[in-house]
C-alpha cells in the first residue's frame, strides 16, 4: 500500500473551487487525508423548484389557487398542472401533505436500488472523518519533486510554481465503522440542506438517515489535498483552512484538527504566524499564546458584561469575535488596518444578528408592501421617489431626518428580502425593523436616542472605509467610537430582548 511517506507516488489532489475566493493573506498547504471508496444507494431526485415552492406555500396555509398564483407569481394553468403532479406522485391528498411530502420537506429523500460510489474523507493526522465526500479525484498533473517540498504549476499560462507546505504528521489508517460513516454523512447532508435552503433550519432529528454503505475497496487511498491557510481577521477564529472539497469556504472540523498540530509541527505554526502577521521575534508571546490570551479575555468579558447573549447563539458568535478583536486593537497604539476593519465588520454583524433574531424573517411578512408604488400583475413595482420613501420612515416617532434620508436609498426589493429572508446587510435590516416593529424602535429610541443614526453611520463606514476597493483610511478612534455605541446598544437590548 502507498503511504504518505511515499512522496513521489502518493496521490496529490486540487481543491475544488465553487467560486473565486479573495484572501487577505494566505499560505498553500498539502493536507494529508485517507480516502475511502464506498458505495451507497442513490437518492431519488428532488422535486423541481416550482413544485417545492407550491408544496411549501400549501404548508404555510395557501389552500386556494388564487393565493398560490399571487405568492408564487406562477400562471394559473401552471399551478393546476403542478397540483395535479403533486397529487399523482403522492405528495398531496387534497390540500394536505402526505407523509411522503413531510419527509421530503424535512430533507429526507427516498433512495433507489441503484448505487453510486464516492470517497469519504478521513483526516490522516488524527483519523477523524470529515463531513465531506468527493465524487471524483481531481489529480494534480506534473508534480515537481526537485525541492524539499513537492511543487506544481498553478497554470500553464503563467508557469508559476506553487510550493505548499507538506504536512507529514500522519497516523496509521484505520477503517471507519458504519456508525462513524453514517454520522459523517448526516453532517454532510445537513450542510447540503443548509446551502440549498439557506433560510430553512433542518434539525438533526430530521436527518437521522441510515445509509446502507459498503466499502468498494478495503484499503484507503493516501492523498495530499491542496488547501489554503488564510486569515480573514474577523470571525470566530483568527485563521482557517479552506474546505478541501470546495463545498464551503472553510471546514470547522479540519480547523479543529489543525489547531492540535501547532505544538508538534513548527513549520505549520510558522505559516500560521505569517498569515496572522505575527513575528515571534518581535513579541514576547508566540501566536498560540497570544490567541489563547485574547480568547480567554474575550470569554471573561462576555460572561461578565453580556451574559444574556448566551441565549442567542448568532449574537453571541459576533460579540465574542468583537471582544477578541477589541483586545487586539487596544494592545497596539497603531493596530494593523485589517484588525480595525475586522472589528468594524463584527460590530455591524452584531446589530444584524439582533435584527434577524428579533424580526424572525418570514416569507409571508408583507409589511414591505408599503413601499410598493404599483403592481404589475403579481409583481411589485417599488416606489423610487426618495422623498416619499423618507416620509414613510418619518412616520415612526424618533426617526431623524438623517436616518430617513439614508434609509430611503435602500431599494424596496432589498427591504422585502430583509423581512422575508433575512439575507440582507445592516441598512435593509434596519428599514425592515422600522416597518415591522415601529413601536419597538420608538421604545428603544426613548432609552438610547441616537442608536439608529449611529447604526447607519456604522454601516456607511463599513462600506466606505473597510472595503478593499475603498481609498478611505479607517482610524482607531473611529472604530472605538463605533465600539462604544454598540456597547451602549447591547446594554439596552438586554432589556428589549428580555421582554420580547
Image: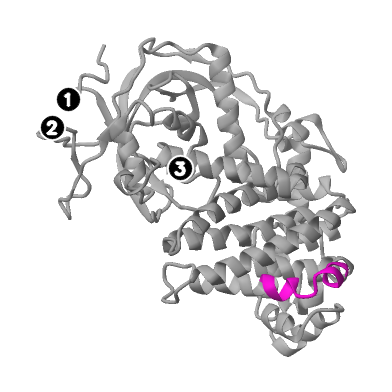
User: What secondary structure is found at the residue carrying circle 2?
Assistant: loop
Cα distance between the residues tagged 2 and 3: 36 Å
Q: Is residue 68 above or below residue 138?
A: below
Instruction: Write down the quadrant of residue 492 in the picture.
Output: bottom right
Dominant secondary-structure state across the stretch colored magenta: helix
Q: Nearer the viewer, mark 3 or mark 1?
A: 3
Foreground pick, 385 / 290: 290
Q: Nearer the viewer, mark 2 or mark 3?
A: 3
User: What secondary structure is found at the residue carrying circle 1?
Assistant: loop
Circle nearer the N terminus (1, 2): 1
Give the residue displayed 19% in from the left and 40% down from the top.
Answer: 152
Foreground pick, 34 / 64: 34
Q: Using a 10 Å C-alpha cutoff, classify the residue at mark 2 as few (fewer than 14 neighbours), some (14 to 19) or many (20 or more).
A: few
Q: Is residue 97 above or below residue 392?
A: above
Q: Which residues are magenta?
A: 443-455
Tell me the residue that label 2 is attached to.
145
Q: Is residue 182 above or below residue 322?
A: above
Q: Are marks 1 and 2 in contact (CB under 8 Å)?
A: yes
Q: Position of residue 410 (x, y in %)?
A: 66, 76
Q: Are marks 3 and 1 in contact (CB under 8 Å)?
A: no
Q: Which mark is residue 8?
A: 1
Circle nearer the N terminus (2, 3): 2
Instruction: Write down the quadrant of residue 69 in the picture.
Output: bottom right
Instruction: Write down the quadrant of residue 355 in the picture.
Output: bottom right
Q: Is residue 307 left or right of residue 171?
A: right
Tell me the residue that label 3 is attached to.
290
Q: Position of residue 323 (x, y in %)?
A: 60, 51
Q: Using a 10 Å C-alpha cutoff, classify the residue at mark 3 as few (fewer than 14 neighbours), some (14 to 19) or many (20 or more).
A: some
Q: Are marks 2 and 3 in contact (CB under 8 Å)?
A: no
Cα distance between the residues tagged 1 and 2: 7 Å
Amino acid at each position: 500500500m502507498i503511504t504518505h511517506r511515499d512522496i513521489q507516488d502518493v496521490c496529490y489532489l486540487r481543491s475544488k473551487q465553487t467560486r473565486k475566493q479573495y484572501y487577505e493573506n494566505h499560505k498553500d498547504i498539502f493536507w494529508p487525508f485517507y480516502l475511502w471508496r464506498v458505495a451507497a444507494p442513490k437518492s431519488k431526485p428532488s422535486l423541481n423548484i416550482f413544485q417545492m415552492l407550491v408544496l411549501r406555500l400549501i404548508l404555510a396555509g395557501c389552500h386556494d389557487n388564487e393565493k398560490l398564483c399571487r405568492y408564487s407569481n406562477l400562471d394559473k394553468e401552471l399551478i393546476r398542472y403542478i397540483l395535479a403532479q403533486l397529487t399523482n406522485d403522492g405528495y398531496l391528498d387534497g390540500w394536505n401533505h402526505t407523509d411522503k411530502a413531510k419527509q421530503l420537506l424535512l430533507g429526507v429523500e427516498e433512495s433507489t436500488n441503484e448505487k453510486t460510489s464516492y470517497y469519504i474523507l478521513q483526516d490522516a493526522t488524527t483519523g477523524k472523518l470529515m463531513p465531506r465526500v468527493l465524487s471524483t479525484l481531481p489529480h494534480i498533473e506534473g508534480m515537481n519533486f526537485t525541492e524539499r517540498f513537492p511543487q506544481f504549476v498553478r497554470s500553464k499560462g503563467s508557469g508559476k510554481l506553487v510550493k505548499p507546505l507538506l504536512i507529514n504528521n500522519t497516523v496509521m489508517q484505520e477503517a471507519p465503522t458504519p456508525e462513524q460513516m453514517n454520522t459523517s454523512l448526516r453532517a454532510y447532508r445537513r450542510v447540503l440542506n443548509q446551502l440549498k435552503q439557506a433560510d430553512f433550519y433542518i434539525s438533526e432529528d430530521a436527518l437521522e438517515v441510515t445509509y446502507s454503505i459498503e466499502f468498494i475497496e478495503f484499503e484507503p487511498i493516501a492523498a495530499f489535498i491542496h488547501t489554503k491557510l488564510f486569515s480573514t481577521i474577523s470571525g470566530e477564529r483568527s485563521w482557517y483552512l479552506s474546505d478541501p472539497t470546495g463545498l464551503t469556504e472553510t471546514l470547522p472540523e479540519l480547523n479543529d484538527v489543525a489547531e492540535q498540530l501547532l505544538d508538534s509541527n513548527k513549520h505549520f505554526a510558522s505559516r500560521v504566524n505569517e498569515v496572522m502577521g505575527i513575528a515571534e521575534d518581535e513579541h514576547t508571546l508566540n501566536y498560540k499564546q497570544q490567541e489563547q490570551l485574547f480568547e480567554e479575555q474575550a470569554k471573561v468579558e462576555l460572561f461578565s458584561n453580556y451574559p444574556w447573549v448566551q441565549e442567542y447563539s448568532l449574537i453571541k458568535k459576533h460579540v465574542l469575535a468583537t471582544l477578541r478583536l477589541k483586545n487586539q486593537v487596544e494592545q497596539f497604539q497603531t493596530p494593523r488596518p485589517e484588525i480595525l476593519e475586522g472589528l468594524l465588520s463584527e460590530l455591524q454583524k452584531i446589530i444584524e444578528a439582533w435584527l434577524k433574531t428579533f424580526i424572525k424573517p418570514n416569507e409571508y411578512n408583507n409589511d414591505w408592501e408599503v413601499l410598493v408604488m404599483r403592481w404589475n400583475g403579481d409583481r411589485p413595482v417599488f416606489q423610487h421617489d426618495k422623498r416619499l420613501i423618507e416620509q414613510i420612515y418619518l412616520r415612526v416617532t424618533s426617526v431623524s431626518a438623517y436616518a430617513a434620508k439614508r434609509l430611503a436609498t435602500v431599494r424596496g426589493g432589498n427591504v422585502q428580502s430583509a423581512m422575508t429572508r433575512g439575507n440582507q446587510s445592516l441598512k435593509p435590516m434596519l428599514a425592515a425593523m422600522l416597518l415591522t416593529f415601529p413601536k419597538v424602535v420608538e421604545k428603544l429610541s426613548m432609552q438610547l436616542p441616537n442608536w439608529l443614526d449611529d447604526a447607519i453611520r456604522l454601516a456607511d463606514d463599513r462600506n466606505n472605509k473597510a472595503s478593499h476597493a475603498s481609498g478611505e483610511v479607517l482610524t482607531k478612534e473611529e472604530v472605538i467610537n463605533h465600539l462604544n455605541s454598540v456597547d451602549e446598544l447591547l446594554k439596552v437590548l438586554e432589556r428589549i430582548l428580555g421582554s420580547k
